[in-house]
Amino acid sequence: MISDKDWADLLRTRATSPRAVAEAYADRRRRRDLLSDAGTVFLVAADHPARGALAVGEDPLAMADRRDLLDRLLVALADPAVDGVLGTPDVIEELLLLDALHDKVVIGSMNRGGLAGAGWEIDDRFTAYDPASISECRLDGGKMLLRIVDDDPGTVATLQACAEAVSELARLGLPAMVEPLPYRHEQGRLVLCDDAAALARAVTVASGLGRTSAYTWLKLPATTPEVLNATTLPVVVLGGQPSGDPAADLATWGAALDHPVVRGLVVGRTLLYPPDGDVAATVRAAGQVLGKRRIG
């Protein structure tokens, strides 16, 4: 938990010492490898607020309370099974100023311009980190969201931007974590297409982005072997929308983790906002599921 003193210090630093952010980036002790000694990676995702996606369950503003969000992230990061965090600059910098990211993997979230519910949501502009800043800030890679909607021209601009980002990250020798998700418009809403054919197609599209796939990772929903067989690229399983049943979520992730291309988990709201409020126990349970993953 963040003490009142640490919170006051953070707010004071934000107001009076902007140079402290650059110093914190420079001073962070970096972990040498993305994968743990067990050959896996477990990241907590905290990039939802920058896209205006604040709801968890029936609470529309669950992720809007920044001190509460940071408290939950600190609890998760304290678990030795958690390798690091995926977030936008504001969240990453607050965790840096709270001295919470030494020896952790830090992945910068890049395109957050497709605001949740906006008319331009699929035209997902790069509004957070870019490849140059990820390198300059000594982060360990970049993540991008690629929602594919065949009847929405915003997909084309996002495809091109993601391809350029994959190429530039590779030039810098940094992993690009691409999250390809097929969607369709349904009664004014975007709905995830979770059938195997749509997901496999998205996997093949994302795998071919950029000048090289040497540094590309995929971030995918827990899915079937049929979908995962569509790539040789390393995959991390995303948590997705919390189902309200953590045990069922864990079982779903566990089944996907047995596939040889899957290397880990990247989970956000499901871990940070469990129904019973016990973040530590939920993170610990997810770490145990990942620990059973059989490395090929």
Image: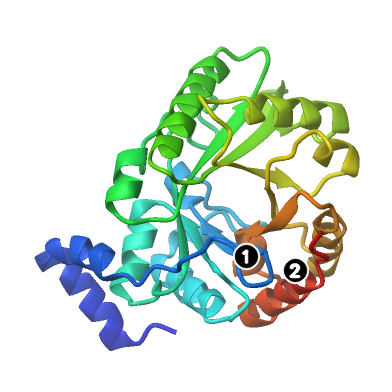
Spatial separation of the CA atoms under disc 1 and disc 2: 8 Å
- The answer to whether 93 appears left or right of 256 in the picture is left
Helix, strand or loop status at disc 1 = strand
Amino acid type assigned to the residue bearing label 2 in the image:
Leu
> What's the mark number on residue 42?
1
- Sequence order check, earlier mark of 1 and 2: 1
Q: Is residue 155 above or below residue 248?
A: above
Give x and y (percent) for residue 91. Answer: 38, 60
Give x and y (percent) for residue 100. Answer: 39, 76
For the N terminus, give its image quadrant.
bottom left
State the residue at coordinates (83%, 45%). 223
- Give the camera-side residue of 93 and 257: 257
Q: Is residue 48 visible?
A: yes
Please name the residue that numbered disc 2 is placed on.
Answer: 290
Helix, strand or loop status at disc 2 = helix
State the residue at coordinates (31%, 86%). 4
For the C terminus, give its image quadrant.
bottom right
- The answer to whether 206 appears left or right of 260 in the picture is left
- The answer to whether 197 appears left or right of 231 in the picture is right
Amino acid type assigned to the residue bearing label 1 in the image:
Phe
**Residues at marks 1 and 2 touching, judged by CB atoms closer than 8 Å:** yes
- The answer to whether 279 appears left or right of 20 in the picture is right
Q: Is residue 186 above or below residue 255?
A: above
Which of the colour schemes (rainbow, by chain, secondary structure, one colour) is used? rainbow
Q: Is residue 124 visible?
A: no
Give x and y (percent) for residue 180. Answer: 65, 34
Looking at the rendering, which quadrant does residue 35 occupy? bottom right
Q: Residue furthest left?
A: 16
User: Label 2: few (<14), some or many (≥20) within 10 Å?
Assistant: many
User: Label 1: few (<14), some or many (≥20) within 10 Å?
Assistant: many
